[in-house]
Image (tube, helix red, strand yellow):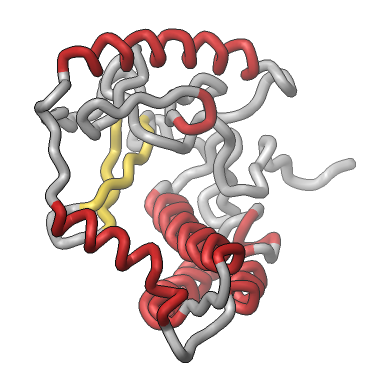
Amino acid sequence: MGGEQVGGSSAGMAIHKAEGLVPINAQGQSTLPGLYAAGDALGSYMSGGIYTQIGGSLAGSAVQGAIAGDAAARESLQMKGKLSVSSQQIERVSAGILAPLKRERGYGPAWVTQILQGVMIPNFVLYIKKEKMMQGALAYVEELREHHVPMLLADDLHTLRLAHETENMIITAEMKLKASIMRKESRCSHYRLDCPDIDNENWQAWINIWQDENGQMQLEKQPFDMWPNFVST
C-alpha cells in the first residue's frame, strides 16, 4: 500500500486494558479502598500497547476476574464497619444525579453528544494525531465540560441516563486528549504525525490520570517496571 506506517493506531485513542482503574498490585486493587477491577475496567495493560491477537484478551480478563473477585471478597470481610458514607454526601450525590431532571432550561444530551463527536471523530484528532489539532479539540471539549454539562437537560429517566453518559464521554475525551498531548512520541496504538518516532529515553512509561483535592485533572508518568506511587488508605 505504501506510505508511512502508523503502527496500528487506535481510533479510540487507546486500546482495551490500557484504560480503567489504575491497579496498585497484581490482585487488581485500585487506589480506592476496597475497590477492585478486572477486564476492561482495569488499566492492567495486559494487551500491551497494541493487540497481537483479536479476541485474545478474553481468557486473560476471565483470570483477572477470578483473582480480583477472590481478593475483594477476602478484603470485604475485614472492612465491615470501617467505611461509612455521611447523609450529607448521599444527599450531594443524589442531587447531582437528579439535577438534569430538575432543570427548566438547557440542552438535550443528544445535541451535546453530536457536537462532541464532530470534534473528536475527525481522523486528524482521533487517529493520526497532531498537537495543534488536539489543542483545538481540547478547547472545544473544555467548553462543553465547563458550560454545557451544567446545562444538560432530561425529561425522563432514559434521557437522564443519556445526560450522564454524555458527561462521561466529555470527561473521557478530555483525559485522552491531554494524555495524547503529553506523550510526545509515537508508540504502538498511539501515533503522532508531529512526533512519529518512539522515544525510549523519556517515554518508557504509562500515563496515570487522577483528580487532585481541588477537583482538577492531573497527569503523571508511571514507569513500565514500577507500580504507581499512590497509597491506598
Residue 110 in the figure: left or right of residue 84: right
Q: Which percent across, then down, holds residue 162? A: 57, 63
Nearest to the observer: residue 62 or residue 88: 88
Q: Which percent across, then down, holds residue 138? A: 46, 69
Q: Which percent across, then down, holds residue 114? A: 66, 73
Nearest to the observer: residue 53 or residue 4: 53
Residue at left offset 55%, top offset 17% = 61
Hey, which quadrant is residue 102 in on the image? bottom left
Q: Which percent across, then down, holds residue 165? A: 53, 59
Nearest to the observer: residue 197 or residue 230: 230
Question: How many labels, in total?
Answer: 0
Residue at left offset 52%, top offset 29% = 17
Hey, which quadrant is residue 74 in on the image? top left
Does residue 4 sit above or below 151 in this rendering?
above
Given the current orientation, which residue lies at the most extreme right position? 1
Hey, which quadrant is residue 221 in on the image? top left
Q: Is residue 58 visible from the viewing direction of this image? A: yes
Given the current orientation, which residue lies at the most extreme bottom position? 105
Which quarter of the figure is the C terminus placed in?
A: top left
